[in-house]
Amino acid sequence: MNPYYKDYSEFLAEHFDGKVQKLSVDVGFTCPNRDGSAGTGGCIYCNNRAFSPDWDKRHTPVAEQIARGKRFFGKKYPDMKYLAYFQSYTSTYASPDSLMALYNEALDQDDIVGLIIGTRPDCMPDSLLDRIASLDTKVFIEYGAESSHNSTLSLINRCHTWEATVDAVHRTAARGIPVGLHLILGLPGEDEEMMTTTVERVSSLPVSTVKFHQLQILRGTTLEKMAPMLDIPAFTAEEYAALCARLLGHLRSDIAVERFVAQAPDDMLLSPRWGLKNYQFTSLLQKHLAAMAHLRCK
């Protein structure tokens, strides 16, 4: 158990007996801020290949994607159970019938004990929520919130508001579905006060988990072209770890933190290039949290 914050393993242990592993599933969805429904061009920082490096699997049936993932992890952990993670782009951006067919295909596979559905807060109608809530399995929904400041959301071309996030969280939690939010730290124009406000606003909502990660400037994105004209914080790894430690002081203690950093493929990442593995960053963060705890005890 982490002494400073609730980590994701604690959250999973509340829902499952034994070890579970997420298996990413890509079924070729797009987003409403790409196809013209809400906007075009997508989020200015987004190159989906950064977190879906196995890009061609989006043409592969769900069952086969899951089988591949199980073969990889099953060699080392033969008793592992799995969560099918519909991750890429907006994984509720299709007709309810087609979505439920995909979700049920995943659930029909051996050793799949639940679903994680990643989506946008403006792409979760009540009709779909009701059908998801009726599934006889564990389901977790993660919304990309990124920021609570509408000026920032407009700048990064999210094409939804913070109010849409608040509404989606409340509607989802009211159906007994655990809700996670994704937040990006270091977005253009945001200072620590603004990021703190976002964390405090998240803490006021019925949220179960959060994912933090640093803003990354990736090749082939709109942000790559815009970066010289934007006020983007240039955190060192040490500065970013200290920021995360301070922000945790504003996060409700029962909200589990799944991660603090993202790692894009080296050939795609322009900045920040910290060269740290996840465990190395966690060690750095723990150092700052321990120092803060020591000061409070004095």
Image (spheres, rainbow, N blue to C red):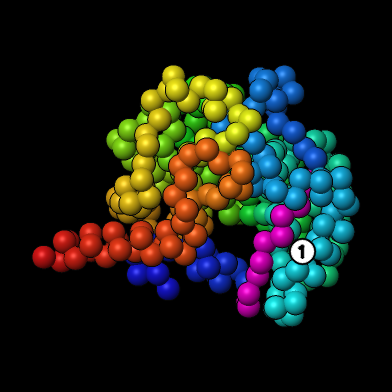
Asked whether, in this view, residue 143 is left or right of residue 295, the answer is: right
Q: Nearer the viewer, residue 89 or 44?
A: 44
Is 23 magenta? The answer is yes
* Residue at the front extreme of this rendering: 267
Question: Which quarter of the figure is the N terminus placed in?
Answer: bottom left
Question: Relative to 48, is 14 on the left or the right?
Answer: left
Vertical comparison of 281 with 129: above or below: below
Asked where in the image residue 2 lies, by quadrant, the reply is bottom left
Looking at the rendering, the stretch of residues picked out in magenta corresponds to 17-27
Dot 1 lies on which element?
Answer: helix
In the picture of the structure, the residue carrying the numbered disc 1 is 69
Q: Nearer the viewer, residue 215 or 289?
A: 215
Where residue 58 appears, as percent x and y from the top left, is 81, 45
Q: Is residue 258 magenta?
A: no
| Residue lying farthest to the left in this orientation | 298
How many labels sit on residues? Answer: 1
Instruction: Residue 227: give x, y in percent of width and height.
Output: 47, 25
The type of residue carrying mark 1 is Gly
Estimate how packed mark 1 is, as few (under 14), some (14 to 19) or many (20 or more) residues with alpha carbons within 10 Å. some
Residue 175 placement, left or right of 95: left
Dividing the image into 4 quarters, which one contains the C terminus?
A: bottom left
Query: In the rendered image of this protein, does residue 153 appear above or below residue 64?
Result: above
